[in-house]
Image (spheres, helix red, strand yellow):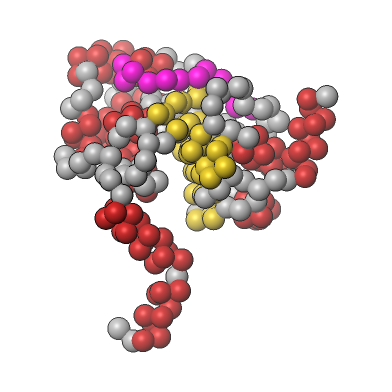
């Protein structure tokens, strides 16, 4: 490998992140042995209880509809990768909040690794509360809306996640814009510990894009690293004067 290429690679932030993760995996205690992967985690679930839920809700070809989450092997695998990307398989125990927790697979894997995890979602899909009860998960029933603060959650969190976000009304006329997201980021920051992290994963819009340039600029201005559909804050989102003023007007 040419020297110039080596130097360029060393300057790449992804190289530094990879080295940090590698060292952490060496020196920090693992939370559990990863051998067996998703199959081992699936085996810990009450099979009879899951089959009863599947029999009630499964359809032959679910497409993008919510019964697709009954494909346990697929979605456990996806959420196991998310857990590893978030470095939750080693290190200290964390307080985790998952917004739009759905069937609860991400929460269950976090719990499997010894973390204290709680979900937040609406109750309109019958399968979701059934699955969270089966998996023994903590769940808050709440709808996330524009300019609506999250409820009192009882504690602050080391990590807040939201995967495949639907609360911003993707592919609809009332899609969230910069003001709605600005308010949301300020509100979420109130629920994070001083060194807490926020991870967002956006759904695609009709044109295949994940966000406007203006929204990307907002995320980056408030401290995020944006990579395609993923928005990563390694600290609580920085304060926005616009969002604080909006919050003040709403609560007056």
Left or right, 168 with respect to 83, comes to: right
Residue 61 position (above or below residue 84)? above
Q: Quadrant of residue 173?
A: top right
Residue 57 in view in this figure: no
Residue 17 position (above or below residue 145)? below
Left or right, 120 with respect to 144, comes to: left
Residue 158 position (above or below residue 149)? below
Give the number of marks.
Answer: 0
At 18% from the left and 33% from the top, the residue drawn is 40
At 20% from the left and 25% from the top, the residue drawn is 44
Q: Which quadrant, please, contains the N terminus?
A: bottom left
Residue 17 picture location, percent across and down: 41, 60
Q: What stretch is highlighted in magenta?
A: 134-145
Q: Camera-side residue: 210 or 24? A: 24
Residue 135 in view in this figure: yes
Residue 12 picture location, percent across and down: 45, 70
Q: Does the magenta stretch include residue 142?
A: yes
Q: Does the magenta stretch include residue 19?
A: no
At 38% from the left and 25% from the top, the residue drawn is 103
Residue 113 picture location, percent across and down: 30, 35
At 68% from the left and 31% from the top, the residue drawn is 146
Q: Which quadrant, please, contains the C terminus?
A: top right
Residue 19 picture location, percent across and down: 35, 63
Q: In which quarter of the image is residue 57?
A: top left
């Amino acid at each position: 490998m040419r020297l110039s290429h080596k130097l360029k690679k060393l300057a790449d932030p992804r190289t530094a992140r990879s080295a940090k993760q590698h060292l952490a995996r060496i020196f920090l205690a693992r939370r559990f042995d990863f051998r067996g992967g998703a199959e081992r985690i699936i085996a810990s679930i009450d099979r009879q209880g899951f089959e009863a839920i599947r029999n009630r809700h499964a359809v032959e070809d679910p497409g993008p509809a919510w019964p697709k989450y009954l494909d346990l092997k697929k979605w456990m695998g996806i959420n196991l990768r998310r857990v590893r990307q978030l470095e939750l398989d080693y290190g200290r125990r964390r307080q985790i909040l998952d917004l739009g927790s759905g069937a609860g697979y991400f929460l269950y894997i976090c719990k499997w690794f010894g973390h204290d995890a709680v979900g937040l979602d609406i109750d309109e899909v019958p399968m979701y509360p059934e699955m969270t009860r089966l998996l023994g998960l903590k769940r808050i029933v709440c709808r996330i809306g524009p300019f609506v603060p999250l409820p009192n959650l009882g504690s602050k969190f080391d990590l807040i996640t939201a995967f495949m976000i639907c609360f911003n009304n993707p592919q609809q006329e009332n899609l969230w814009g910069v003001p709605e997201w600005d308010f949301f980021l300020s509100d979420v920051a109130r629920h994070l510990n001083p060194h807490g992290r926020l991870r967002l994963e956006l759904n695609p819009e009709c044109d295949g894009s994940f966000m406007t340039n203006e929204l990307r600029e907002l995320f980056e201005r408030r401290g995020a690293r944006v990579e395609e559909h993923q928005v990563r804050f390694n600290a609580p989102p920085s304060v926005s004067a616009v969002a604080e003023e909006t919050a003040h007007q709403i609560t007056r």
